[in-house]
Each structure stands twice: as C-alpha cells, then as structure tokens.
Image (cartoon, rainbow, N blue to C red):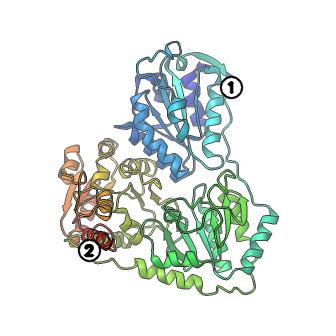
Amino acid sequence: MSKFRTAAQVLVDQLAIHGVEHVFCVPGESFLPVLDALHDSPIQMTVCRQEGGAAMMADAVGKATGRPGICFVTRGPGATNASAGIHIAQQDSTPLIMFVGQVDRKMKERGAFQELDYRAVFGSMTKWTAEIDDPARMAEFVSRAFHQATAGRPGPVVIALPEDMLSEMVEVEDAPPAKDVEIAPGGEDLAQLSSMLAAAERPLLIVGGTRWDEDACSHITRFAERHQLPVITSYRRLPLFDPLHPNYAGDLGIGPNPKLISRIRNADLLIIAGGRLGEIASQGYSLLDIPSPASKLVHIYPDAMEIGRVYAPALSINASPRRFAPALAGLDAPSSVKWAGSADEAHAEYLAWTDKETPQPGDVNLGTIMVWLRENLGPDTILCNGAGNYASWIHRFYRFRKFASHIAPTSASMGYGMPSAVAMQRLYPDRTVISVNGDGDFLMNGQEFAIAVQYQLPIVVLVCDNGIYGTIRMHQEREYPGRRIATDLRNPDFAGYARVFGGFGVTVDRTEDFPAAFEAARASRLPSIVHIKISPEAILPGTTLSKISEQARQRQQSK
C-alpha cells in the first residue's frame, strides 16, 4: 500500500524493512530530514567523531553479519573523509552502503558549497555509485543498493542524496527486502572435482573470502575431514576454520610459516574455496605461476568475473559458500587416498610454529601477551585490529575459534581497530571486544575512543607503542639501511589519553605486568587503554630491526 511521506522517511522505512538495526554517522545539515526520520525509528544511531570512523564501523558490521553496514556522511569533506572506509570495503569484499548528502538539485554544476561529483569520486572503488534526483524512486534505489552490495563479490555502494529532494512529499509503495542470491555448483563440476581429488597426491584446500556463515564453515570442515585434506585460511580469514582442528595447516598472511609455503609450492592440486588468493595471500603473486599455475587449480567463487582474472583454473566453479560448502560436504571420499597423514603433518607444523612465543628484545614480548590472551579469553571474544607489524603477533600466536571473531581489514588500512571495536561492542553488547593497535595506527582514528566513552562501551584497547612507524621503518632498513627518515614518532601517554576522555588507562613496561593490567582494565567496565611499551627492535616475531638492517648492508657490500 502506498504511503504519503517525505523521501527521507521512505529511506528510513526501507532500512528498517531490510533489517538494519544500526547506522553510523557524523551528522550534517545536508541530510537533516533523514536524521529527523531516524528520531522515531527503532534503528540505533551511533554518532562518530570522523567520517572515516563511521565508514569503518559500517564495514565492520558488514564483515560480522554478511549484511550491508550502513553509514551516513555529509557532502564534500565528509564524503572524502569516509573514502578510506569505502576502499576497505572494496578491497575486503564487504557489503556496505554509504548515504552521502548532496547540494540542492538547482545548485548542481555550479561548484556550490561542498559540491562533489560522487560518481567520479567513488566510481572506481564501489560496485555502484548513484544520485537520487526523483524522490519517488527512493525505495527503488535503496532496494537496488542492497542487492548490489551483497551480490556476487560483495562490496560498497554510495548513494548521494540532494538536500532538497529529501524533504519532498511522495506517495510510494515500499520495496520488499532484498534476498541474497546464492549460487550452487553444478553436478558436472562436482563430479570433475571428485575425479581430480581421486587422481591427486598432494592436495590442499585454501578457504577465504566473504559470504560465509557458521553452517557453511561446518560443512567445509566436514568436507576436509572426509577427504583428509590439510586446510589453509587466507589472509585475515582465520575464523573460517578452527585452528585446533587436526586438519588445520595454518594461514596465508604476512610472515607465514615457511613450511606452509613449501607445502603449497609442492601441492599438485589446490582448491581455492571462496577467496581470490590476492597479493598478500599469494605472497606477492609468487606462489603460483600466472596465468597458468603448475599445480592443478580449482577455483570456487561467487562472482564469475573474478574467476580467471589472475589465474586460469583447471576447474572453475561459480558458486557461493552457503551453497558450495554443503555440496562439497556431500561428496564421497575415495576409498583410499595417497595423501593420508598429510593433514596431521601439516597441523603438527602449524602447532610447532604457533604454540610458543619467540624471544624478543626489550622488556615486553608481544608474543607472550598474545599467548596469554588466547589462553585467557573465551572463544566468543571479538578481536579487532588495523594495520602494522604488531599484527604479525596476532596472526601467529592468537587463535580464533569462532566465526566472525576477527574483524580486521585485508587492505591493511591503518586506523581500523578502534572504530571497528566500537561497532562490534554496539552490535554485541554482551561479548568481550578488544582492539589491538599500533601507536601510529591508533592515532589515525583514536578519537573514536570518545565514542566508546559516550556509549559506555567496555572495550579494552591495546596500544603497542614502539615509537616508530614500524612497517615503514622495516622496509626502510631493508632497502636503505641506516638512512631513516619520517618514521620516528613522539607519542603521548596513551593511558593518560584514556583517562582524559573518561576511560581507564594503564601502562605496561614489562611482560609480566600485562595480565594484571588487562584484568584491571576489564574490571573497570570502562572503555580502557592498555599502553604497552615495546622496543623498536622487536619488529617481527622472527627477527629484529638491527638484523634486517645488517643483512641489507651485507647485500649492498656483496654487489
């Protein structure tokens, strides 16, 4: 039935129809009618301190739920501030819809105040960018936005809202909620996969990408068990497979286990299920020959446009995880396999690589801290982080045992850990949420700590402070040893930073002080910062900054 209401009210009604429970915004006068419509809506609003934080919060919701995260930002500088979050969603295949204010329709093309051509600005990093000039088409555009954000390879959508259009009255019907289009593998493809497995001697399964749920993960585990396959998780997709399962072989991230890399290079059959095997996971596109890998490649992916984009598979299967995982679980395993025992061997190598922390210079060992966290936090804990060398310790020593318990950008965008933790604690108020950050990383969006205080979110934030932009310094020493520039940081007292905002703060100077500091932060029930002071020499779990620099000098001298 048609209803007479403002275009802004149509928009908010469509969000509710699509099951949206949370939106994130920095308010702007360019979409005041939408804010007014949200006033009486059951949708929960989280106000943010910077538009990049709002977009990253929406991205985090998209990662955790598989449904589009929603944010609203104002025109011009608000939109450009948010672009970092849009780029993350594009790189990470995360469903996200950003609504952005626009100048009045009668002022367009004049270079009006904060005017932007959004199709030009966001066209290269979204699945669809559009502007709604006709208020009667609001429901249509919102419906399409949800379909576009979730179809095939998920990603971001940007919808521009001219200010004068939002307050116009229209009589239109609501659009029904969008439903995910799930694609199942064909019988011939499954039969060919079975034949390839029967002929293989050293097969491996690599799981990654998005569009998974807990049931799909359970099915892929069953498939691996029945076929005795070693299973590898792609970069920052660790929660897709239980790391303590006897079939788990490790993850393909930054600084992976050398034995895992060797195992992949020696495989004669690689099944890539759900992911793209991008630059990080492929170790700079060095693991497989391009375009024709030496090993037989099976690529299962929900978007046909991505299959064959880099690697030419021996078998291409266009299917989504919620459909291909149960189909794979139903495949009969060969009566005997030539690779029997390889999963146990691979898992033993993974445990040996990750069980115990490595020695580190300085008074704080981040590996010991990660081991303590994995042994003292429940599997329901959500860990959020951004980008930096500190994340190497997360990937190597922490273990994610529940679906969607790790929220982090595969695009390695700094500043993600704080806003994503805010989003997760808003979404799951009864779960433990921790945010792990580097010092340079944290201050790119550290102002969102104020939002944690405003909404009384008991997030525990770890700031790993080594006083440098560590990743860049590492590359600097590797390429130009001893010639450091632009990588030193003079940091604040991060514990004091927390207290000034109204939270709890504590500083850790020694490894053995961390457990008590962390428990004090949790006990405070306030947003907390645990300021961890780390030696700049502790650059990676397996080496030091000085060793990297010295090796670079030796290479230069040998030329």
Residue appearing at x 59%, y 66% in the figure? 207
Whether pointer 1 and pointer 2 mark residues with C-beta atoms closer than 8 Å, the reply is no
Side (left or right) of 235 relative to 210? left
Residue appearing at x 18%, y 50% in the figure? 492
Helix, strand or loop at label 2? It is loop
Side (left or right) of 30 relative to 201? left
Q: Position of residue 173 (x, y in %)?
A: 68, 25
Which residue occupies the foreground of this view, 181 or 202? 202
Asked where in the image residue 386 lies, by quadrant, the reply is bottom left
> Label 2 crowding class (10 Å Cα cut-off): few <14, some 14-19, many 20+?
many
Numbered disc in front, either 1 or 2: 2
Which residue occupies the foreground of this view, 147 or 469? 469
Q: Position of residue 552 (x, y in %)?
A: 30, 69
Residue appearing at x 66%, y 39% in the figure? 177
As drawn, the residue found furthest toward the front would be 559
The quadrant of the picture occupied by the N terminus is top right
Which residue is under mark 2?
360
The quadrant of the picture occupied by the C terminus is bottom left
Mark 1 vs mark 2: which is more N-terminal?
A: 1
Which residue is under mark 1?
173
Which residue occupies the foreground of this view, 87 or 357? 87
Report how far apart the C-alphas of labels 1 and 2 lie in the structure: 63 Å
Amino acid under disc 1:
Glu
Q: Is residue 250 above or below residue 217?
A: below
As drawn, the residue found furthest toward the top would be 106
